[in-house]
Amino acid sequence: MFEQTMTRLHELMIVLYAISILFYFIDFLNKNRKANLFAFWLLAIVWVLQTIFLFLYMIDTGRFPVLTIFEGLYFYAWVLITLSLVINRLLRVDFTVFFTNVLGFIIMAIHTFAPVQVESRAMAEQLVSELLLIHITMAILSYGAFSLSFVFSLLYLLQFKLLKEKKWGQRLWRISDLSKLEKMSYILNAIGVAMLLLSLILGMQWAFIKLPNFILYDPKIIGSFILLILYSIYLYLRIKKNVFGKSLAMLNAAAFLIILINFFLGSRLSSFHFWYS
């Protein structure tokens, strides 16, 4: 019972950490101080829980937890979170904070879901299954964000066409203005990129644990990384190159077509993504 409770708390930390990274990513893109503050306090909760577990483990074992690979991973993740909190409060270096947390999340996911550290085989199998569940859920949520972003881009293109052709009518007024449509599409893509990145991290972790003949050049994996790159380019053009308007909306629509190809064709060609088919 105690082992199961501790496992659930570690899974809760992973979820809170993922949400924190999502808000840090929003702040990283837009310098949103509210998102930064929310991310900071979520990460602070994770740090408190980690610190408590660290001290409990030290009391239980009577030593500093660095003698095994999994003890070292946990302490390493704790150090990264500590440094991230300090940097966020004192230095305000958003670029460093975001990527430090991505690295910390990877380390913490490896520690939490690695079955080697769990004494009970049944619990270890359950952990791996739950890792897969979180991976799939995050992937589908990211696809949902991209899909809704695609809808906003289509409405943008339709509104743009109506305005260009000067077709004033009820349909024109029922569609929101261009700037709002573009902003919503951008925000949803930012959320989708963060969730897809976290999903890929957890998915790779599951594959390394569960699949003895795991290959990185699986069609589904390649397609997912292509999607991540495409939507990252979208964000880069929007933020750094100040690309707006019709060209960005068309790029977003093209990226969504890649999602459909990856979801349906990539799943059928993949050697282990059969549950998506």
Image (spheres, rainbow, N blue to C red):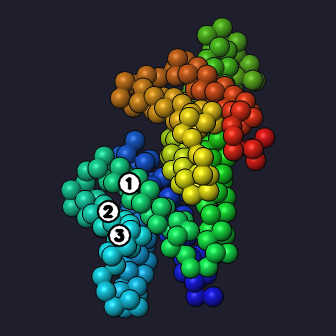
- SS type, badge 1: helix
Confirm or deny contact between disc 2 and disc 1 (CB under 8 A): yes
Residue drawn where x is 51% and y is 58% of the image: 19
Disc 2 marks which residue? 80
Between circles 3 and 1, the one closer to the viewer is 3
Real-space Cα separation, disc 3 to disc 1, in angstroms: 15 Å
Mark with earlier residue (2, 3) = 3
Real-space Cα separation, disc 2 to disc 1, in angstroms: 8 Å
Real-space Cα separation, disc 2 to disc 3, in angstroms: 12 Å
- Lateral position of residue 94 relative to residue 151, left or right: left
Q: Position of residue 11 (x, y in %)?
A: 56, 69
- The image quarter containing residue 133 is bottom right
* Most distant residue in the top direction: 165
- Lateral position of residue 154 relative to residue 51, left or right: right
Q: Position of residue 111 (x, y in %)?
A: 46, 66
Disc 1 marks which residue? 103
Q: Residues within 10 Å of mark 1 (few under 14, many from 20)?
A: some
**As shown in the figure, which amino acid type bears the numbered disc 1?**
Leu
- SS type, badge 2: helix
Disc 3 marks which residue? 72
> Which image quarter is the C terminus in?
top right
**As shown in the figure, which amino acid type bears the numbered disc 3?**
Gly
**As shown in the figure, which amino acid type bears the numbered disc 2?**
Leu
Between circles 2 and 3, the one closer to the viewer is 3
Residue drawn where x is 69% and y is 44% of the image: 272
